[in-house]
Amino acid sequence: MKNSIFSLLLLLPLLASCVERQVYIVHFREHSEEKTLHEIEETHHSYLFSVKKTEEEARASLLYSYKHSINGFAALLTTDEASKLSEMEEVVSVYQSDPKKYSLQTTRSWEFVGLQEGIHTKLKKEDLLLRARYGQDVIVGVLDSGLWPESKSFSDEGMGPIPKSWKGVCQTGQAFTLSNCNKKVIGARYYLKGYEAIYGPLNTTLDCRSPRDWDGHGSHTSSIVGGQRVPNVSFIGGFARGTASGGAPLARLAMYKACWAIPYQGKELGNTCFEEDLLAAIDDAVADGVHVLSISVVTSTPYPYDQDGIAKAALQSIKKEIVVACSAGNLGPVLETLSNPAPWMITVAASSVDRAFVASVMLGNGEEIEGHTLTTYKLKRKMYPLVYAAQVVNPDVPKNAAGQCLPGSLSPEKTKGKIVMCLRGQGTRIGKGEEVKRAGGSGFILGNNPANGAEIQDDTHVLPATDVNSDNAIKILEYINSAKNPMGYITPARTKIHYKPAPFMASFSSRGPSTISPGILKPDITAPGLNILAAWSEASSPTKKASDHRVVQYNLDSGTSMSCPHVAAAAALIKSIHPHWSSAAIRSALMTSATMTNNKGRLITDALGNPADPFQFGSGHFRPTMAADPGLVYDASYTDYLLFLCGSRLDTMDPSFKCPKNPPSPNNLNYPSLSIPKLNGIVTVERTVTNVGGPKSVYFASVKPPLGFSVKVSPPILVFNKVGEKKKFTITVEATSESASTIGKDEYAFGWYTWTDGIHHVRSPMAVSLA
Ligand SMILES: *[C@@H]1O[C@H](CO)[C@@H](O)[C@H](O)[C@H]1NC(C)=O
Ligand SMILES: *[C@@H]1O[C@H](CO)[C@@H](O)[C@H](O)[C@H]1NC(C)=O
């Protein structure tokens, strides 16, 4: 998963040589008067015609005309034509589509969420599902690599008629007929004009020219949001056996396939999604009538909103109160790597669940060391010679690569019949096991290096194997160094639940602060994204490698791609219970009810066991049942987001809206969290909460100020007399005299403020740094 963002770089020289016209995305101001779709398209044509020689050429060069998500088009243009267009007054932006900009980034996860909530509430997950009618009135659009319609997760058993509001279609194509849509998969479309403009016609052995998933990713994410309950499924070898179920098991799904295999590159190295194809997909999704969008697509680096198609299109979808959930990205643990930072979307980080696949290493000295694996291979019951890879490499292998088990590095003579321990770092995890097997090793231990800490992505190694955390890797190395005849054994793996601590943050989960809008605290929330079991494409193996011929209906996968649909599902359930809530109200409910505590009752940690912070988990781990009854919400409208853009000195892209002379500071966007970068002395921000709980209620403020700051909430008591009533309050943050000595420059301190009426705890995290 992590590689996908980088993989495209290899292709650039190939692209540069064969194209002279490039795909450009041209974005106009929003249409101020009512125009028919035909009129909008004709306007787009006339602009194109004004820079092209002939009408025919203009029509042929147009890939997409966008009407619902943004007002604009994608077309093949020369640099000259592009620059002429960019000089026109009505044009907001013209930029070249960048093929390396976007890429895609799953039984236990839902039970775990229910369990987590059980500590704090009498409500059960089942009550939530019943109240939400299992999500059956809600339509979730998924932008991804397609889906495998034959999967039991996408059966429509027991589902009522398709909602009358639905205007979408079932687009047929290669290996995809009308019968592949049903009352569960109510829509399916695909978009590849942008892809084909660069890569040429799709190679139909590589991917499927239809909404069918040839990869696995799209089946996985869409079954996490809205897959049916399928009992007794498991991964190969019986791992993770249980009921597979989407978070909203009766929600309707609409697949918008806009992500494709990359030619001349293995599927395991990732896929690509072209901006113009994504825009066309969101354009249709908005017009089709989806309620929630789940977008597990990220940019390679953070892009400003006006250069990020997903952000622009999502802003327009707010007019229809569509909830947009997006992945934070898989570029952690480095700070400021976060993708999808716009305040009108929900940005989702990834964390672990309380399930582990445990296989221990037994050392010759009797010590048992815990490891994790999904391999189905087992050793004979006896002790084997145990070596560190560097002891059995070929003589020509450089010292710094000696423990890495890179292809061809191990000496078969020295390796045969032994258990070999390799370290993570260079090369692929599965590939290291393949090398041990090639050299005749009997077993394989993959040790984390210190940077990986305790995070293990359970691998399906090709021989008996187990993965150990960095502390355990050191223990094994010490044993190998000290014993005369080091010996070892790897026990067969078994599934262990109620594993502690959980959740912890996945180290790959991208971190804040947001470089685009440091005044908005991102990510917003975290949800399960490590070793999640969900539906898969039967055209792809569990490792996606061409050499792997296994076919699975369910597969384990990791990434913020998997956590995003968890939150989309929770949003769908809340939408079902509260159909008139705005997109912002639903996000607020999810955020303010999230927890920062793990199943040991302590602060959620990172993969190394250190306390995590809001730049990793946002408001915390989501709790859908609590979110259905949040007490208060922080609401925001389309206009509020435009005011936020005015205050951030950014183009609102909407001519019918004039920015006020003194727009509010971006901090005053009515967001359920607070970020104050570079605080100079003292600042006061404003918030408004809406009562969505009992008609008569009294809320009290409590504060945990960030170290080195004082925080005052005013007034400290809010009295509500009816549902829907709004109350304003202010938060004043001031640097104390010690602040400079407690936090360094560019360092953030974290705290929170909470409104409580004794039943609801409406918590907002805050992050503050000094000027
Ligand atoms: C299409 O992809 C297959 C599988 O990777 C490959 O063998 C074949 O050569 C490709 N065809 C073309 C026309 O590139
Ligand atoms: C679950 O499936 C396994 C293997 O397919 C089978 O052996 C087992 O009896 C099934 N369990 C139930 C409860 O159906």
Image (cartoon, grey):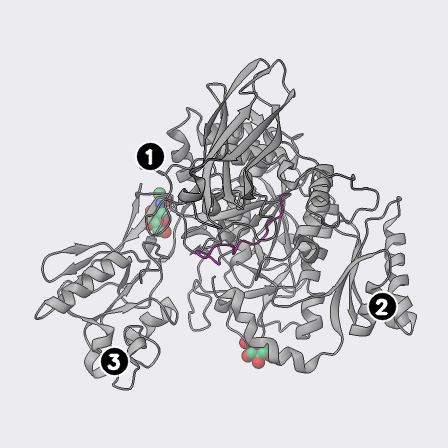
Using a 10 Å C-alpha cutoff, classify the residue at mark 3 as few (fewer than 14 neighbours), some (14 to 19) or many (20 or more).
many
Q: Nearer the viewer, mark 3 or mark 1?
A: 1
Question: Where is 180 relative to 262, above or below?
Answer: above
Question: Where is 721 relative to 342, above or below?
Answer: above
> In x, y percent, where is residue 228?
51, 43
Question: Where is 555 relative to 82, above or below?
Answer: above
Q: Is mark 3 within 8 Å of ligand 1?
A: no
Between the C-alphas of marks 3 and 1, the distance is: 46 Å
Q: Is residue 765 among the parts visible in the rendering?
A: yes
- What residue appears at the point 53 percent right and 74 percent down from the top-left corner? 265
* Type of amino acid under label 3: Val
* Type of amino acid under label 2: Lys
Helix, strand, or loop for circle 2? Answer: helix
Residue toward you, 379 or 730: 730
Q: Nearer the viewer, mark 2 or mark 3?
A: 2
Would you say the residues marked 1 and 2 are in contact, meaning their CB atoms lie under 8 Å apart? no
The region drawn magenta spans 331-343
Mark 3 lies on residue: 393
Q: Quadrant of residue 323?
A: top right
Number of numbered markers: 3
Mark 1 lies on residue: 601
Residue toward you, 48 or 659: 659
Mark 2 lies on residue: 84
Ligand 1 quadrant? bottom right
> In x, y percent, where is residue 73?
79, 60
- What residue appears at the point 36 percent right and 51 percent down from the top-left corner? 607
- What residue appears at the point 52 percent right and 56 percent down from the top-left corner? 337
Q: Main secondary structure of the magenta part?
A: loop
